[in-house]
Image (tube, grey):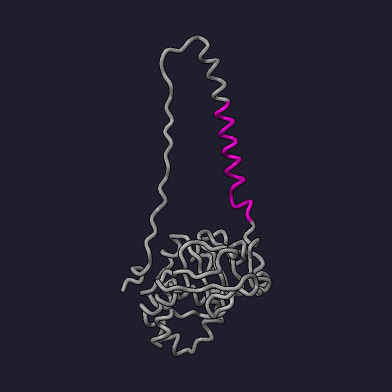
Amino acid sequence: MNTRSILPRFGALAATVMLMSACSGGMSEDAPAEGEQPAASQEQSSEEGGMGSDDGGDMGMDPAANLVGPGCADYAAMVPDGAGSVEGMAQDPLSVAASNNPMLTTLTSAVSGELNPDVDLADTLDGGEFTVFAPVDDAFSAIPEEDLTALAGDAEGLSEVLTFHVVPGQLSPDEVAGTHTTVQGEEIEVSGSGDELMVGDAAVICGGVTTQNATVYMIDTVLMPPAMAEQG
């Protein structure tokens, strides 16, 4: 089974092309002198545009500014700098950022095809904007080993579970509360705020962690889609 078939397709953003026309025709002797001013203005505009671009870049944003959750301080102490830190994760696409986080090693194995070669969602997760409720390693450790082994061997079931933790679009901590339709297709409810933010029955350990294309909320429990929970 191609597990990516259950994921929505995200279209590429269309680029806008601006056409500039050059004036031609008869020019008087004053034309060169008059043409100097527009050239200078154009040069000034280019400089201003460049400065605006720099000011609007990542340099003005603090990746740690909107973090929520009681475990953020412990996370920062565990990974104060480097690729797996809050600042480091902000520089990489989702799959790479998660792989550098020492609290998300099992999740990384699950989405990268390491647990099951038929379940490799890395390219898809890097190809759009998402909010990810990411179970930490301790959350996976709480699942009985035989159940985890069975889930790992079931490509369809593993894909259902993983994509139930993903919501299209990036939701910041001040807008994440509410009911959201997951990539898996069923709804998930986020409640509370600040250090008491909950995703279903899972508590947010540290959330609002950004990557190049996603906002991550590390949670303490692996969530089961309602339909699968009823079957189990």
Residue at the image position 38 percent from the left and 86 percent from the top: 231
Image coords of residue 103 (percent x, y): 57, 75
> Is residue 118 part of the magenta span, yes or no?
no
The spot of residue 25 in percent (x, y) is 41, 15
Query: 60 or 174: which is nearer to us?
Result: 174
Q: Which residues are magenta?
A: 41-61
* Residue 191: percent from left, percent from top: 57, 73
Please, what is the dominant secondary structure of the magenta stretch?
helix
Q: Residue 76, located in which quarter of the rendered image?
A: bottom right
* Picture quadrant of residue 124: bottom left
Q: From the viewer's perspective, is residue 136 above or below residue 9?
A: below
User: Measured from the top left, where is residue 87 in percent x and y?
Assistant: 62, 61
Across the whole image, how many numbered discs are drawn on residues? 0
Give the residue at x 40% y 48%: 14
Above or below, 113 against 169 in this view is: below
Position of the N terminus by quadrant: bottom left
Q: Is residue 171 above or below residue 159?
A: above
